[in-house]
Image (cartoon, helix red, strand yellow):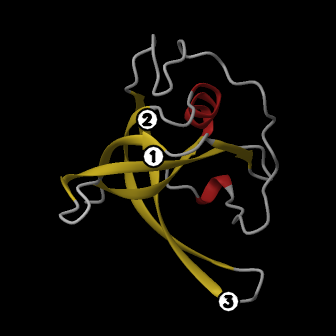
Amino acid sequence: MNKVILIGNLTKDPEMRQTTNGTNVCTLSLAVNRRFKDKTTGETVADFFNVIVWRQLAEICGRYLAKGRKVCVVGELQNRSYDAKDGTKRYVTEIVAEDVEFLTPRDRDASGAGDYAPRNDRPAPQAPDGFVDIDDDALPF
């Protein structure tokens, strides 16, 4: 069984893009606090995860989420590799989301701003360098 459930805050605005086939993909950067604090500094210790969201859910996340929002991500771990610009093979572990629930109340977010307003301020860029194009037929869902 491969199942991941995380609750955390977005460390930056979602990054929207489209595959060469036009499928929406959204990347989220999620900080998840651990249950303990650092003994020397007293600061909360966090782990950071990259989350990949596909299709309509990607569009919703890209439109309504922003840095600081609290979300619950349900998905699975996925490993992949790609060739970097310098020719070396790189390996990454990501979470492929099946579901993303918005946990920040609609009337306030982490910055104290208003409710979930659509974010139409940026177009979805095409697949950037280093992004692995995935054929829709190769997706596990």
- Circle 3 packing at 10 Å, graded few (<14), some (14-19), many (20+), is few
Answer left or right for 140 relative to 130.
Answer: left
Mark 1 residue element = strand
Residue located beneath label 1 in the image: 97
- Circle 2 packing at 10 Å, graded few (<14), some (14-19), many (20+), is many
Q: Are marks 2 and 1 in contact (CB under 8 Å)?
A: yes
Mark 2 residue element = strand
The residue under the point 54% across, 12% down is 114
The residue under the point 55% across, 37% down is 67
Circle 1: residue type? Ala
Give the CA distance from mark 3 to mark 1. 28 Å
Q: Are marks 2 and 3 in contact (CB under 8 Å)?
A: no
Circle 3: residue type? Thr
**Residue 55 position (above or below residue 90):** above
- Circle 1 packing at 10 Å, graded few (<14), some (14-19), many (20+), is many
Residue located beneath label 3 in the image: 88
Answer left or right for 74 relative to 59.
Answer: left
Residue located beneath label 2 in the image: 100
The mark tally for this picture is 3
The residue under the point 28% across, 54% down is 43
**Residue 132: horizontal and vertical position, in percent?**
69, 66
